[in-house]
Image (spheres, grey):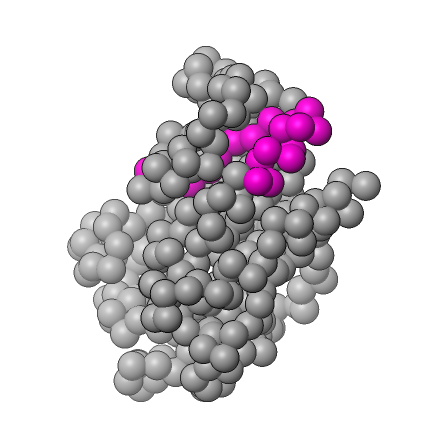
């Protein structure tokens, strides 16, 4: 649950976890929001439904992006730049959200990330997780991407990175959702199990955060794990394919982004329309390894 993420941030006083994505809120959830007696609601999404829910919770002033005819229900709605097909956005999503907060009087962001409090008791962890947390010189590999193969760097490229890291005396842990476990198994196949663990689908979000905190580096596709690691200050390398790094790259100076733009990109497709996956295959393991060596030195 993303609730674990927000609950790990001491700067947040209260987290309301909604049970079920992309559906109407229950009356209990609306009542929980109403009980906070909030004076202002700032919505970072474009949902008309959520504006209605906030209205039902009697939040008097609502602000957010102008979208889907919801502006009339809000105290203030901002028009956002529209994307030009096959062009890079040049407007990061984080800049959009920070701009909204700034418009309501929040101070300008100084670039520092908040501290996360992630405490795991060993007795509450699985033996596999405890083994991973005890491994030396961990590199995380987030080889999956729920959206589809057009966002996934080839498994054999991830495997080459894992091989080189192991040869340098490190350990590797594959991270991701349960649906990505098979891809991660392909990446780690044949490597010694005491130094190469596949934990895709086998961790809670809190456990994932604990593993990232122990990691020296993360190699990832454009994914949630990438953003989480960047927010926690973990260095890494991100490979972009069908999506737009100018809009969704990790917000961290410790990260190196790899993107080989093609005439057809960014296409935002789940699968490569041409079948070549040229944008991903053009990023070589050598290039990513150079970035790893530079950061580690």
For this orientation, the residue located farthest to the right is: 297
Place residue 167 in its image quadrant: top right
Front residue (pair 248, 99): 248
Quarter of the figure with the N terminus: top left
Q: Using the rendered image of the protein, determine whether residue 100 is visible from the camera's viewpoint.
A: no
Q: Using the rendered image of the protein, determine whether residue 218 is visible from the camera's viewpoint.
A: yes
Q: Please give the name of the residue rendered at 27% of the width and 74% of the height, measured from the top-left corner.
A: 48
| Stretch of the chain drawn in magenta | 160-178
Place residue 189 in its image quadrant: top left
Q: Is residue 113 above or below residue 187?
A: below
Front residue (pair 259, 227): 259
Residue 172 within the segment the image draws in magenta: yes
Place residue 40 in its image quadrant: bottom left
Front residue (pair 44, 198): 198
Q: Is residue 205 above or below residue 78?
A: above
Q: Is residue 261 above or below residue 161?
A: below
Position of 116 with respect to 73 (left or right) is right
Q: Please give the name of the residue rendered at 57% of the width and 40% of the height, measured from the top-left corner.
A: 160
Residue 134 within the segment the image draws in magenta: no
The spot of residue 236 in percent (x, y) is 63, 47
Q: Please give the name of the residue rendered at 35% of the width and 57% of the height, measured from the top-left corner.
A: 148
Q: Please give the name of the residue rendered at 64% of the width and 35% of the height, measured from the top-left corner.
A: 164
The spot of residue 53 in percent (x, y) is 26, 65
The spot of residue 142 in percent (x, y) is 49, 43
The spot of residue 137 in percent (x, y) is 67, 27
Position of 100 with respect to 16 (left or right) is right
So how many labels did they put on this image?
A: 0
Q: Is residue 69 above or below residue 210?
A: below
Quarter of the figure with the C terminus: top right
């Amino acid at each position: 649950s993303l609730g674990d993420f927000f609950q790990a941030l001491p700067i947040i006083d209260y987290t309301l976890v909604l049970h079920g994505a992309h559906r109407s809120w229950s009356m209990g959830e609306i009542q929980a929001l109403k009980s906070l007696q909030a004076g202002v609601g700032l919505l970072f999404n474009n949902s008309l439904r959520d504006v209605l829910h906030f209205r039902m919770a009697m939040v008097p002033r609502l602000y957010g992006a102008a979208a889907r005819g919801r502006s009339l229900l809000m105290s203030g709605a901002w028009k956002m730049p529209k994307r030009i097909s096959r062009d890079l956005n040049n407007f990061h999503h984080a800049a959009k959200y920070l701009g909204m907060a700034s418009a309501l009087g929040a101070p300008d962001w100084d670039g520092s990330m908040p501290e996360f409090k992630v405490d795991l008791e060993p007795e509450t962890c699985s033996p596999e997780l405890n083994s991973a947390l005890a491994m030396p010189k961990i590199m995380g590999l987030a080889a999956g991407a729920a959206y589809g193969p057009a966002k996934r760097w080839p498994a054999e490229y991830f495997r080459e990175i894992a091989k080189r890291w192991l040869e340098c005396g490190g350990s590797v842990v594959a991270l991701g959702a349960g649906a990505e476990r098979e891809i991660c198994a392909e990446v780690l196949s044949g490597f010694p199990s005491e130094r190469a663990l596949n934990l895709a689908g086998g961790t809670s979000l809190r456990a994932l955060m604990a593993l990232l905190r122990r990691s020296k580096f993360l190699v990832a596709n454009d994914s949630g794990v990438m953003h989480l690691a960047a927010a926690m200050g973990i260095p890494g390398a991100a490979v972009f394919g069908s999506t737009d790094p100018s809009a969704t790259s990790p917000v961290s100076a410790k990260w190196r982004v790899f993107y080989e733009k093609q005439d057809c990109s960014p296409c935002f497709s789940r699968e490569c329309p041409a079948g070549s996956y040229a944008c991903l295959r053009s990023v070589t393991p050598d290039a990513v390894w150079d970035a790893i060596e530079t950061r580690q030195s």
